Amino acid sequence: MKKVTPAKTIDEYISAFPKNVQDALQEIRQTIKSAAPEAEETISYHMPAFKLKGSDLAYFAGFKKHIGLYPPAPKAFSRQTAPYAGPKGNLKFPIDEPIPLDLVRRIVQYKAKEILQSGGPK
């Protein structure tokens, strides 16, 4: 059995997916970058991640039928995120539907504000 090597960069991670999924992953990536331009891109837990002041801001991952957004959305967004609710509070955006990029942007901005107000990890 062929061993899959984990991606070392977000570009490498995204390039492993079919074109339609790559496009959706790039849209989410760009949305996060524009919502929190000071956040740093990295790979964490084998998926694309953004860190802000050393704190986890957002992770996203591609799957066969959806794209996941982690960690769980803040409770302030529970009504808006209900259609996308996955197990443990993560969000699951179906591949065959438009991704609610405005919602992603607002969640990232909210979390970035929380991180910046708290001063980062304790």
Image: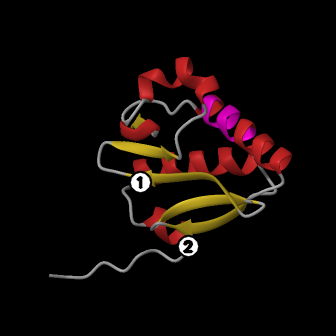
The image shows residue 75 at horizontal and vertical percentages of 59, 27
Residue picked out by circle 2: 9
The image shows residue 89 at horizontal and vertical percentages of 45, 36
Mark 1 Cα within 10 Å, few/some/many (few <14, many 20+)? Answer: few
Q: Is residue 55 above or below residue 20?
A: below
| Relative to 78, 118 lies left or right | right
**Which kind of residue does numbered mark 1 sit on?**
Lys
Q: Residue at x 79, y 53 (%)?
A: 37
The image shows residue 76 at horizontal and vertical percentages of 64, 24
| Relative to 49, 119 lies left or right | right
**Which kind of residue does numbered mark 2 sit on?**
Thr
Which of the numbered marks, if any, corresponds to residue 19? 1
Check the image and tell me how it is coloured.
Answer: secondary structure
Most distant residue in the top direction = 79
Nearer to us in this view, 42 or 74 = 74
Which stretch appears magenta?
103-109
Nearer to us in this view, 79 or 61 = 79
| Relative to 1, 10 lies left or right | right
Residue 5 lies in what quarter of the image?
bottom left
Which of the numbered marks, if any, corresponds to residue 98? none
> What is the CA distance from the residue labelled 2 to the residue labelled 1?
18 Å
User: Can residue 95 be seen by looking at this rendering?
Assistant: no
Q: Does the magenta segment cover residue 106?
A: yes
Residue 51 lies in what quarter of the image?
bottom right
Q: In the picture, which quadrant includes the N terminus?
A: bottom left
Give SS at disc 1: helix
